[in-house]
Image (cartoon, coloured by chain):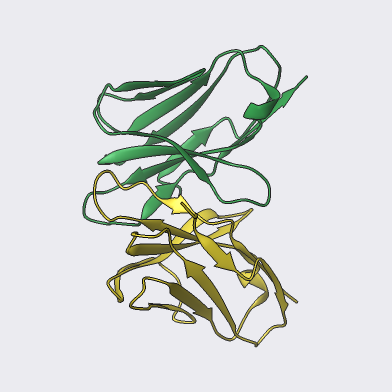
Amino acid sequence: KAGVTQTPRYLIKTRGQQVTLSCSPISGHRSVSWYQQTPGQGLQFLFEYFSETQRNKGNFPGRFSGRQFSNSRSEMNVSTLELGDSALYLCASSIRGGTGELFFGEGSRLTVL
Amino acid sequence: TQLLEQSPQFLSIQEGENLTVYCNSSSVFSSLQWYRQEPGEGPVLLVTVVTGGEVKKLKRLTFQFGDARKDSSLHITAAQTGDTGLYLCAGAWADSWGKLQFGAGTQVVVTP
């Protein structure tokens, strides 16, 4: 069974640009969550999508947005990039039932210069 | 403010030694999960504990969930170099699917 796939794995952007990250969940998983991981703040929840609708949202500014497609694939977008957006962005999928286990991808490493 | 406090932040031990990582919170969670993350990879789920007082064993790893469902511990017996990694605890709430509250993590280094 294929795991969670995130693309791209690495990218470099400059301040003010925007970026789109993609996530393909495990087959049969319809819930996709996004997290930001930095050395200073650790893993922080961005948002969760299920059935193409945002169901939960973390405390991030409106520059961070996402969407989910009918095949459960998800994208997140960060506009007007700031230096502090440099981080590992992790996507996780789940079946949205049971005890809440998440299955993470390897992440997209974003560097903002 | 971290809702989940992990201690210690860093642990360096030799192969064959035992270690314990603690995860404490002021919040009650519906479940608590432990993950291990290696450099350049995403966290990998080790175990989920749900019931207060629950103890789960996974080979040389023993996980406990406190009676009040606010704290947890991970004990590794006879550590091996393959146990090296960042150990993360994460609390889940029943009404916030997909949203886990992560601790800051404990970096464990096991040397030969």
- Chain letter, green in picture: B
User: Residue at coordinates 55% horizontally, 74% vertically from top-left?
Assistant: A21
Q: Is residue A82 above or below residue B49?
A: below
* Percent of width and height locating residue A37: 57, 57
User: Residue at coordinates 63% horizontally, 28% vertically from top-left?
Assistant: B83
User: Residue at coordinates 63% horizontally, 71% vertically from top-left?
Assistant: A8
Q: Would residue B52 be visible to someone looking at this image?
A: yes
- Chain letter, yellow in picture: A
> What is the residue that sits farthest to the right in this orientation?
B112
Number of numbered markers: 0
State the residue in front, B2 or B103.
B103
**Quarter placement of the C terminus of chain B:** top right
User: Residue at coordinates 69% horizontally, 83% vertically from top-left?
Assistant: A15
* Percent of width and height locating residue A74: 43, 73
Q: Would residue B26 be visible to someone looking at this image?
A: no
**Left or right of B110 in this view: A91:** left
> What is the residue that sits farthest to the front in this orientation?
A1
* Percent of width and height locating residue A68: 38, 76
State the residue in front, B81 or A57.
B81
Classify residue A31 by image quadrant.
bottom left
* Percent of width and height locating residue A71: 36, 74
